[in-house]
Image (cartoon, rainbow, N blue to C red):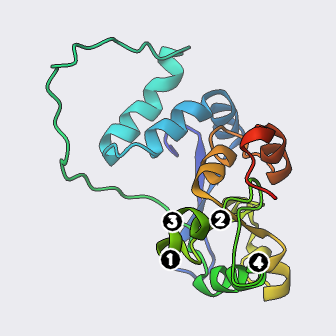
Amino acid sequence: MERDGYATYIKAAGKRDGLFTITDKGKQYLSENLDWVRYLLTNNFSAEDIEANLLLIPKQKYKRIDVGVFDENFLIYEGDVKYRQGKIYGRSSQLRNLAVEKHTINGRIKCSACCFDYEDFFGEHGKGFIEIHHQKPIFMFDESEFVRTIEVALLNVVPVCSNCHRMVHRYKRPLMIGEVKAMINPQLHFCS
């Protein structure tokens, strides 16, 4: 990406490693091709395939994906072992545990969007189960936000069920919890 002008590498003074910084050309590339970049980075492609295809995207100018119709007897192979390499943002298990504790009321925790309660649905097996959503995604934090007090960090997280969490992150721009609430069919809403 550096060779093609999408990023620059800056070695930190007195440090062994440095940082890649995205260039204006890189920002333009991402704004035009974010859906394709996200597709490549979240679908278990090899690093070589990702690199090759990232460079092909602007040349091809794909507009849509054509979906073929296959015979139901078409052979598929599942279970191939694939290895991924990428950047993963660490999550604080302490923050998650404190968020669950904060949002548990009378021994129950519900989705902030649809009020789904796993214990109501699955019984004892679902007790205390919930996902914790960062309202401001971690990748958007600047360095000064990585270390925060628990009180401040707890303001950024809310409990959500798996379905609502997937809807929040379905498209390029994550939805706010209020937007998800507004989409839910009132007849299917779990809130009492």
Q: Could you say which is closer to the camera, residue 31 or residue 149? A: 149
Real-space Cα separation, disc 3 to disc 4, in angstroms: 19 Å
Real-space Cα separation, disc 2 to disc 4, in angstroms: 12 Å
**Spot occupied by residue 64 in the image (x, y as percentages of width and height):** 53, 15
Reading the image, the residue beneath label 4 is 103
Residue 149 appears in view: no
Q: Label 2 amino acid?
A: Asp
Real-space Cα separation, disc 3 to disc 1, in angstroms: 7 Å
In screen coordinates, is 158 left or right of 63? Answer: right
Reading the image, the residue beneath label 2 is 117
Q: Earlier in the sequence, mark 4 or mark 1?
A: 4
Real-space Cα separation, disc 2 to disc 1, in angstroms: 11 Å
Q: Secondary structure at mark 1?
A: helix
Q: Secondary structure at mark 4?
A: helix
Q: Are marks 3 and 1 in contact (CB under 8 Å)?
A: yes
Query: Image quarter for residue 144?
Result: bottom right
Q: Label 4 amino acid?
A: His
Q: Label 3 amino acid?
A: Phe
Q: Earlier in the sequence, mark 3 or mark 4?
A: 4
Query: Image quarter for residue 162?
Result: bottom right
Q: Secondary structure at mark 2?
A: loop
Q: Label 1 amino acid?
A: Glu
- Foreground disc of the pair 4, 1: 1
Tag of residue 70: none
Tally of numbered tags = 4
Dot 2, crowdedness within 10 Å: few (<14), some or many (≥20)? many
Q: Could you say which is closer to the camera, residue 98 or residue 37? A: 98
In screen coordinates, is 46 left or right of 18? Answer: left
Query: Image quarter for residue 135?
Result: bottom right
**Spot occupied by residue 129 in the image (x, y as percentages of width and height):** 56, 72
